[in-house]
Amino acid sequence: MTQKNSAPQGATKQNLIASNVNTAAIEGTVFLDVEKNDSERLRVLVKEYRGRTYIDLRVWYLSNGGYSPSQKGVTLRPTQVTEIVQGLMLAAQSFDPKEAA
């Protein structure tokens, strides 16, 4: 049996609505929604597909006044997240922050 964790406070569709972000196409629980540029957002969602839980990290693009998911992204099994986060942390530590500015 799969144990489902509830979303942390602030990781809800309601916050996106309050931020005036179109949420019509969102299926799942949003954990991150950040502006990438004027026409794209980066979103992390937890969703289910065929009875399994996945984490979806995807670029959403502005389309007809709302945002739609693009093909730019990745869907992960929850068991893969720790390794991915470790890899991201190592990558972030590998450059000089002064050069990134």
Image (tube, rainbow, N blue to C red):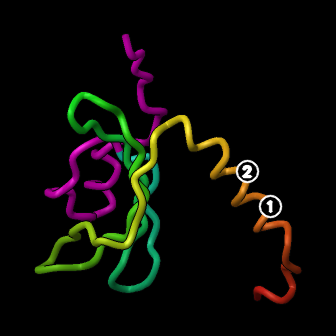
For mark 2, does the 10 Å Cα neighbourhood hold few (<14), some (14 to 19), or many (20 or more) residues?
few
Front residue of this view, candidates 84 and 67: 84
Q: Do labels 1 and 2 touch, CB within 8 Å? A: yes
Is residue 67 left or right of 39 when viewed as pictured? left
- At label 1, the amino acid type is Leu
Residue farthest top in this picture: 1
Counting from the top left corner in percent of width and height, residue 67 is at 23, 70
Q: Main secondary structure of the magenta part?
A: loop
From the viewer's side, name the closer residue of 78 and 10.
Answer: 78
> In which quadrant of the rendered view does residue 71 lie?
bottom left
Q: Left of 76 or right of it: where is 30?
A: left
Q: Position of residue 64 (x, y in %)?
A: 11, 80
Tell me where residue 38 sits by quadrant.
bottom left
Q: Residue at x 34, y 49 (%)?
A: 15
Per the image, label 2 sits on a secondary structure element best described as: helix
What is the magenta range?
1-29
| Residue hosting label 2 | 86
32 to the left or right of 12: right
Q: Residue 40 appears at what percent x and percent y?
A: 36, 78
**Res. 90 mark:** 1
